[in-house]
Amino acid sequence: MTDKQRPERQRIDVINAQGEKVVHSSSQRGAKPAGRAARGAHFSQPANGTKASRTTTQAAPAMPATGAVAANDPHLDQEAMRIHEQGTSKRGRKGRHGKTAAIVVGAVCAVYLGGCALWSHMYMPNTTINGESVAFKTADAVAKEMSNKLSNYSLSASGDNVSLALKGKDIDLKFDTSAYAADTMSKVNVWAWPVSIFTGNDLSAKADVSYSKEKLASLVKTAVDSANQSATQPQSATASFDEKEGKFVVVKEKAGTAVDADAVTKAVRKAILQGKSDLGLGESELVQPKYTSKSTELEKAVETANKYVAAKQTLTANGKTVTTVEPKTIAQWITFGEDLSVSLNTDAIKQWASGDLAKSLNTVGAERKYQRADGKQVTVSGGTYGWSVDGDQLASTLASNIEGAKEASFDVPWSQKASEWNPGGADWGSRYLDVDLTEQHVRFYDGGKIIWESDFVSGDPTEDHATPTGVYSINGNKGTNQTLKGLDENHDGEPDYTSHVNYWMPFITNLVAFHDASWRSSFGGTIYQGNGSHGCINLPAAAAKQLYDITKVGDVVVVHA
């Protein structure tokens, strides 16, 4: 602050006892009253040299000018002294307090930094490494302890019928103990020691251990193989069809006693890293089931399989229900892969369609019973005519519907059909040729009436040439002017016979047929026994011509005894 900026002092005049003005505050900047005279006080010194005493000159004050203050005014002197002493006292107290605080802060800092230095080299109270206490130990001490353990290290592992004992030298064990201790010490936050000495530090460290993995694996394998000789393998949880509930349910897994070599090796390695000398093996080292009842894969597999079995399939023939594919049957076609993937076994479906289903639905070759128009009860079996399931097509349709979880009703696909659906009975309708081998007489029925009939000579049963029984139909080999050549049954290199016929109407491939037999003069009766044909139905020439003219390819032929 410059002189120009400094404020003017207040003007005060001081009057002595004689009423004279002795001093005043100068208008000049920086002027000060001189000594104690400014307060109107002085000392008198006696002539004899005794101690001077402070005296105050009392005089009747004269009336000062306006703004003047008497120099010897006792009120002025006492008040000024009091103010001065108070200021001095406050400044003293503040100084003492500041010094005390500085000392305390310094002491705290010293203790804190000392603690940081101490715990930088020594583990704090309540400190553990991998579960073992190292409180108040230095890193070097811990390293030395580890080194001593390593030099005589051995491990005994037992449990689950396994007995394994190994020494460090057996697996070429090496251990950098210094790095191990230094690593754990580096994990300690020394700056937080005021708290950590009470809460403790639970440290974990991976020791820099090296050993022969091959030797360790070999030792473990030998011990595990010995234990597993009498062990049982675990069984994973599976899906099984419950007939009562009509769906798949989860079958809980079963624990075994077989030991998992990899799990044992892992446990042994961990024990070595922790410096343990004893290791107990338990359930966690057993071979575990691949899937449990809680496995997501199994839950999804059961869900998928139950969608399949719920896809009910109704099979019909000529609009009539012939069978219903129930969940129990579908369940037999469902397979679960090793990864629990669900699929349908189409081969199993084909086998069912061509086997069990075909036996119940196919009429080709099946036994049929019917009543002829003249009232005769006839039972016939065999032949090539009738209903026959197309197993491949049926399996494909079923698989598509089931995999799509689609409930459906549809006609059975047939590889061959008959005129009408009549299981166990006549399924050929009202038009057919009735060949009665016992009577040696054939009748052609159409609409319940005979439109043609004739005696005949059938195959000779005494020569093992009996005409096959069964239900057949006239096939496309029908024709005229045919030359028949017999088989070479006498093995002379030539057909046993050669015959010409005018009318040929085969019903068993191109070997057995209705045809004229010009070499015969009589038909019917018992001629066929000893003088019969090689299996064909021999007819008189006129009858053969008539039959040829009215038959059509596909007309049914029923041959019975």
Image (cartoon, rainbow, N blue to C red):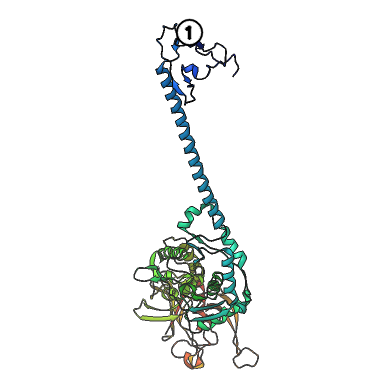
Residue situated furthest front in the rendering:
48
Instruction: Locate the N terminus and report the quarter of the image it occupies.
Output: top right
Residue under the point 60% across and 62% down: 182
Residue under the point 44% across and 64% down: 299
Image position, residue 366 (x, y; %)? 43, 78
Q: Is residue 28 left or right of residue 90?
A: right
Q: Is residue 491 left or right of residue 285?
A: right
Image position, residue 330 (x, y; %)? 43, 69
Please tell me whether residue 131 is drawn above or below residue 155 in the rendered image: above
Please tell me whether residue 105 is drawn above or below residue 439 in the rendered image: above
Image position, residue 81 (x, y; %)? 44, 23
Please tell me whether residue 416 is drawn above or below residue 383 in the rendered image: above
Disc 1 marks which amino acid?
Glu
Instruction: Locate the C terminus and report the quarter of the image it occupies.
Output: bottom left
Please tell me whether residue 122 is drawn above or below residue 261 in the rendered image: above
Q: Nearer the viewer, residue 107 or 266?
A: 107
Residue under the point 55% across and 11% down: 27
Residue 550 visible in the current orientation: no
Image position, residue 500 (x, y; %)? 59, 83
User: Mark 1 sits on what residue?
Assistant: 20
Residue 273 visible in the current orientation: yes
